[in-house]
Amino acid sequence: MKFGLTNSAQEILIDIFKKSPQVVHVVIYGSRAKGSFTSRSDLDLVIADQEIDRFTLGKVISEINESDFPYTIDLQSLGRIQNKNLLDHISRMGKTFYRKD
């Protein structure tokens, strides 16, 4: 179970990301990337593509919320994050979750 996620949970997200042409690279960060997660940990993801627009981000979030994905998720666009500490954390601890072929 990569990042503490079942294969089926990973497949749900990957299928959603594949449907969006603007989503090319997604990074996981936080406790699941560090390996310090618990069964109650959320999933922290950032779309690392600078050109992602709010409409696309909202659509991806809606699709995840409407799916059978079993965890709470925090999905952001890297280009919209202004918190320097968070950006530093993502840069240091983030790991690739999805990259379009």
Image (spheres, rainbow, N blue to C red):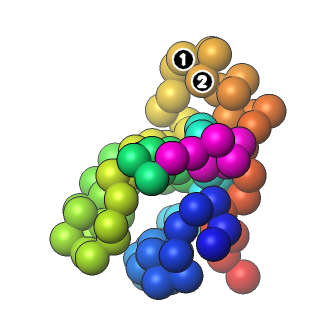
Residue 86 visible in the current orientation: yes
Q: In which quarter of the image is the C terminus?
A: bottom right
Contact flag, marks 2 and 1 (Cβ < 8 Å): yes
Secondary structure of the residue carrying numbered label 1: loop
Relative horizontal placement of residue 49, taking residue 67 as reference (left or right)? right
Instruction: Give the magenta part as a residue range.
Output: 32-38
Q: Residue furthest top?
A: 84
Relative horizontal placement of residue 101, taking residue 70 as reference (left or right)? right
Secondary structure of the residue carrying numbered label 2: helix
Q: Nearer the viewer, residue 100 or 92?
A: 92
Mark 2 = which residue?
Answer: 86
**Location of residue 34 (image quadrant):** top right
Horizontal and vertical percent position of residue 1: 63, 72
Amino acid type assigned to the residue bearing label 2 in the image = Leu
Q: Which residue lies furthest to the front in this view?
A: 39
- Is residue 76 highlighted in magenta? no
Q: Which of 11 and 75 is in front in this view?
A: 11
Marks 2/1: CA distance? 5 Å
Q: Which of 79 and 2 is in front in this view?
A: 2
Classify mark 1: residues with Cα within 10 Å, few (<14), some (14-19) or many (20+).
few
Amino acid type assigned to the residue bearing label 1 in the image = Asn
Residue at position x 57%, y 45% in the image: 37
Mark 1 = which residue?
Answer: 83
In the depicted structure, whether residue 90 falls above or below residue 65: above
Horizontal and vertical percent position of residue 8: 47, 84
